[in-house]
Amino acid sequence: MKTPIRIGLAFCALMLAATAASAAPVAYTGTLSGAAGSPPVPSPATGSTIVVFDMDAHTLTVNMIFSGLLGTTTAAHIHCCTAVPGTGIAGVATETPTFDGFPLGVGSGMYSMSYDTTMASSWSADFLANHGGTTAGAEAAFGAGLASGSAYLNIHTNLYPAGEIRANLAPIPEPGTWAMLLLGIPAVLGLRRRVTPGG
């Protein structure tokens, strides 16, 4: 359990340093669950995510941990933008068919990756086309969707191809709240080890 705690603390330190370095990044968080799906999914799986979007630096950083999936992972990405914030479904906004390096064929795991949002490959072809065909248009639409609560992160599995667990993304209001959320990561990683068979 020491290694996940070290990873969580290192991640916490890096994110806090990034916050201090620039006021431009905006962090969004969400709790992954089947109940958050539209429609809800009867899955006991849980998880959490922190997504940081910086339009000035043109970066998107995705961090998540999850466990207890009934199926095994087939894809994960961020969808945007729903007609009503926090409910409904939307097309995939980010890289398809899944986040680069996302663990596939598993029931639990963790993931962290940063994307250059000036690259067309960071966006789904449909999202790019629907917003002027430019990465600047995609960034603007994605930023507006995040700010309005109309974006969500979805983990898809073989048992639930439309998504087994989902997190509706909401802004983290203050840097102090970042610290509280990030300091909880080691505890969640420890819980993940307890609930993962053979962990």
Image (spheres, grey):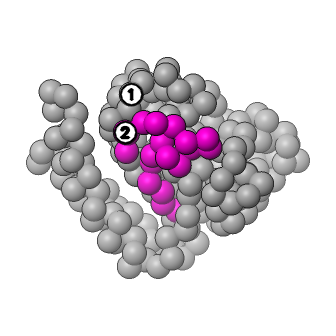
Work out whether 178 lies above or below 185.
Answer: below
Q: Position of 40 compared to 89: left or right?
A: left
Please tell me whether residue 30 is drawn above or below residue 114 in the rendered image. below
Q: How many C-alpha atoms fall within 10 Å of the one at disc 1: few (<14), some, or many (≥20)?
A: some
The reply to whether the magenta stretch includes residue 36 is yes
Residue at horizontal 85 percent and vertical 43 percent from the top: 130
Q: In the picture, residue 18 is in which quadrant? A: bottom left
* Nearer-the-camera pick, 164 or 50: 164
Structural distance between the alpha carbons of marks 1 and 2: 8 Å
> Residue 153: horizontal and vertical position, in percent?
55, 46
- The number of callouts visible is 2
In the displayed structure image, the side of residue 31 where residue 25 appears, left or right: right
Which quadrant would the C terminus be assigned to in this image? top left
Q: Main secondary structure of the magenta part?
A: loop
Q: Is residue 60 left or right of residue 18?
A: right
Q: Which residue is mark 2?
A: 44
Between residues 43 and 77, which one lies in front from this camera angle?
43
Quadrant of the image occupied by residue 67: top left
Residue that sits furthest to the right in the current view: 132
Instruction: Say which label, 1 or 2, has the lower sequence index.
Output: 2
Question: Within 10 angstroms of label 2, few (less than 14), some, or many (20 or more) residues?
Answer: some
Is residue 146 at all visible to an observer of this figure? no
Dots 1, 2 in contact, CB < 8 A: yes
Q: Where is residue 147 drawn, in percent x and y?
A: 66, 66
Question: Where is the N terminus found, in terms of image quarters?
Answer: top left
Residue 122 location, x and y as percent?
A: 64, 40
Residue 160 position (above or below residue 195) = above
Could you say which disc has been placed on residue 70 in the image? 1
Residues drawn in magenta:
28-46
Q: Residue at x 88, y 47 (%)?
A: 132
